[in-house]
Image (cartoon, rainbow, N blue to C red):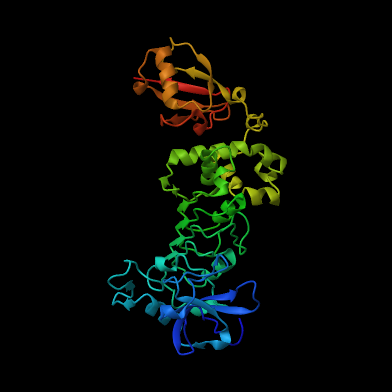
């Protein structure tokens, strides 16, 4: 930032050649060299465009011809950031220390007091060089919408100096690719955004699992929306990607607007625990806790795996067999159905696809046992779960949801 441009220049009012305007952008505007200010003029006839140049939207003005770019040396800077925001959006202070839009505008609370205006969405943002100057103004900020702003992580990282109370952050359609919290390592919680519970990153360019690993560092994240990102199609299907995300982020309760039920979390974590067991072992993992020291590379890729080891125990040898190439024959599971309360019933062994729903399994058992599916109660056990049974209680889920292994037993009971 040059000496002629205040550190909090964005949103400040200026006077240029007798005309008043508000700074909405500071930066380079290729192919021309040097620093430019993006202005929205109070008089729309003073401008030339809507904040775009040669097909690039640097910021978004409220009128198609109210914006222009000027050199900093032509600007006489007026009021500070907060005053400019209030004036631009016709804000009024209220006795309860909130600021709201006046009549005739979109009903929304505004920055610095309780939440943020959607008006910021669609503007290409530039954070002041000294963002700590905004700390006071945004001390109580709880909600921030930066959709369609072109914001990147270098800008987002500065937001942390402002809202310790920030609860909801919307970053839809910003071109976001990655995030990183460098203050802590894998498996630890960052001091940044301590109150953030809801994050929306839909319609972005997220394609690496490291993005999800970084989200696990957030202390309070409970709701995540990640629709229409390359990551969601990186696996065989979106359901697989969703299960991996649930397993990787321990605290989320809602994903893509759907509640995560306890059984779904348990199934996702057990499946993740099994899928990466062989990789964990090869990276230095060990069933003896004193010898269990997986490599830094493995921990960086799977920061929650050690937590899952403590929760479910170390993977048994039978779970560490390498998966065969994907084919129909490799999806078939040998399941033995047992009726522990009915000595007269013989064990029934069947080969079933892992994608078969519990509802269809009960239909099969009805034909074999002549007992209505609605009366059947199923539980699952395997060789490494001695004395423990997992209740199979959702008819719409497939066998693979319960991490059912080849050779497992399903116990069938009815009254």
The picture places residue 265, in percent across and down from the top left corner, at 48, 41
Q: Choose between 144 and 183: the one closer to the eye.
A: 144
Residue occupying image coordinates x 44% and y 30%? 391
Residue 79 visible: no
Compared to 252, does 157 lie above or below? below
Name the residue nearer the viewer: 181 or 377.
181
> Which residue occupies 53% across, 27% down?
354
Which residue is more in the foreground, 365 or 110? 110
x then y, percent, for residue 396? 42, 31
Tell me the quadrant of the picture where the C terminus can be found. Answer: top left
Position of residue 77 relative to residue 233, above or below, is below
- Is 207 rendered above or below residue 35? above
Q: Residue at x 59, y 24 (%)?
A: 328
Residue 155 % position (x, y): 56, 68
Please give left or right for residue 160 compared with residue 280 in the image. Answer: left
Image quarter where the N terminus lies is: bottom right
- Tell me: residue 167, above or below residue 357: below
Question: In the rendered image, is residue 381 in sight?
Answer: yes
The location of residue 343, given as percent across then percent down, is 44, 12
**What is the residue that sits farthest to the top in this orientation?**
344
Q: How many marks?
A: 0
Quarter of the image where one finds residue 282: top right
């Amino acid at each position: 930032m040059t000496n002629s441009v205040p550190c909090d220049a964005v949103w400040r009012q200026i006077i240029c050649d007798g005309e008043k305007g508000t700074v909405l952008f500071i930066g380079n505007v290729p192919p021309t060299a040097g620093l430019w200010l993006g202005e929205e003029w109070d008089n729309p006839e003073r401008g030339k465009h809507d904040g775009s140049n040669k097909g690039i939207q640097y910021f978004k003005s409220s009128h198609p011809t109210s914006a222009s770019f000027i050199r900093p040396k032509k600007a006489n800077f007026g009021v500070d950031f907060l005053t400019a925001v209030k004036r631009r959006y016709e804000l009024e202070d209220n006795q309860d220390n909130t600021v709201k839009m006046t009549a005739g505008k979109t009903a929304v609370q505004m920055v610095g007091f309780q939440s943020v205006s959607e008006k910021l969405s669609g503007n290409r943002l530039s954070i002041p060089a000294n963002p700590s100057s905004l700390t006071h103004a945004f001390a109580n900020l709880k909600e921030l919408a930066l959709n369609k702003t072109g914001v990147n992580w270098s800008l987002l990282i500065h937001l942390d100096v402002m809202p310790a109370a920030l609860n909801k952050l919307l970053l839809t359609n910003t071109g976001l690719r990655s995030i990183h919290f460098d203050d802590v390592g894998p498996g630890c919680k960052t001091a940044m955004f301590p109150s953030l519970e809801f994050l929306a990153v839909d319609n972005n360019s997220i394609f690496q699992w490291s993005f999800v690993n970084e989200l696990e560092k957030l202390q309070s994240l409970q709701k995540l929306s990640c629709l229409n990102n390359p990551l969601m199609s990186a696996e065989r299907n979106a359901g697989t990607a969703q299960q991996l995300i649930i397993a990787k982020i321990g605290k989320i309760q809602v994903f893509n607007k759907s509640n995560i039920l306890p059984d779904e979390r348990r199934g996702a974590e057990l499946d993740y625990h099994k899928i990466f067991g062989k990789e964990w072992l090869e990276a230095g993992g060990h069933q003896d806790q004193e010898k269990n020291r997986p490599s830094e590379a493995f921990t960086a890729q799977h920061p929650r795996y050690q937590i899952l080891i403590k929760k479910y125990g170390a993977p048994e040898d039978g779970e560490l067999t390498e998966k065969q190439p994907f084919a129909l024959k490799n999806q078939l599971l040998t399941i033995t159905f047992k009726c522990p309360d009915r000595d007269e019933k013989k064990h029934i062994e069947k080969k079933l696809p892992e994608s078969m729903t519990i509802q269809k399994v009960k239909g099969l058992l009805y034909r074999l046992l002549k007992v209505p599916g609605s009366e059947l109660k199923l539980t699952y056990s395997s060789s490494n779960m001695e004395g423990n049974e997992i209740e199979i209680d959702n008819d719409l889920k497939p066998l693979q949801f319960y991490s059912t292994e080849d050779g497992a037993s399903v116990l069938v009971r009815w009254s």
